[in-house]
Amino acid sequence: MSSDPFTPPDPGQVRAHRVYASLQRIAERHAATEAQRSRQVHPDVLGPHEAIRLVTLLAGGTARYEEAEAKVDNADITAALTLLPLARAEMDELESGLLLMARGRGLTWQEIAFGLGLGTAQAARQRYERLAGRLAAEPGGDAP
């Protein structure tokens, strides 16, 4: 990031810094101890989807706080919101890859629609096309 006060910041660079800061904040406040980390899927590294889940569960009262753990505050919620696009992009990549694998293994669009809970083969195809379009539109993204 530039220290020149007269040069507008690069939005992508600012966002990347904020994503890192968001993960760091949530990890330090709510995943610092072994007991706190055991609430997540991977006990050593806090991923974006787990950070969002953790803040949501703690703020909603579904997960219990450790004895000296700070309560979720507005900055924690803002940090979790910051991570949503990253987690959504990861899920889009997983879904797109899974759809390609399903097609590669011979599943029909109707079978895929059933698995996704959609009513028609056309709906499943359109879902894949939307995913592929979003992934291709991301910086550095490639259409699957």
Image (spheres, rainbow, N blue to C red):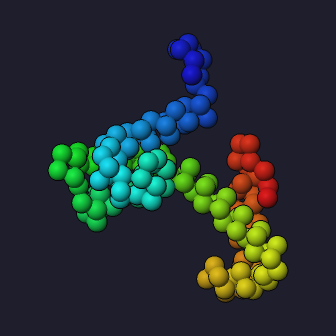
Answer above or below: position of 144 versus 142. Answer: below
Task: Specify the quadrant of the image occupied by residue 103.
Answer: bottom right
**In the rendered image, the vertical position of residue 80 relative to residue 98, given as above or below:** above
**Towards the viewer: 95 or 78:** 95
The foreground one among 118 and 40 is 40
46 to the left or right of 10: left
**Residue 3 x, y percent position in the rendering:** 53, 14
Could you tell me which quadrant the N terminus lies in? top right
Q: Name the residue rendered at 32%, 43% in the picture.
A: 32
Quadrant in which residue 90 is drawn:
bottom right
Is residue 69 visible from the viewing direction of this image? yes
Seen from the viewer's position, the closer of residues 105 and 54 is 105
Task: Decide if residue 130 is in sight here.
Answer: no
Quadrant for the C terminus, please. Answer: bottom right
In the image, is 31 to the left or to the right of 133? left
- In this rendering, the answer to whether 134 lies above or below 95 is above
Q: Residue at x 70, y 47 (%)?
A: 138
- Percent x, y for residue 125? 77, 75
Residue furthest left in the image? 67
Q: Is residue 5 left or right of residue 108?
A: left
Q: Percent x, y for residue 140?
A: 74, 42
Q: Residue at x 72, y 64 (%)?
A: 97
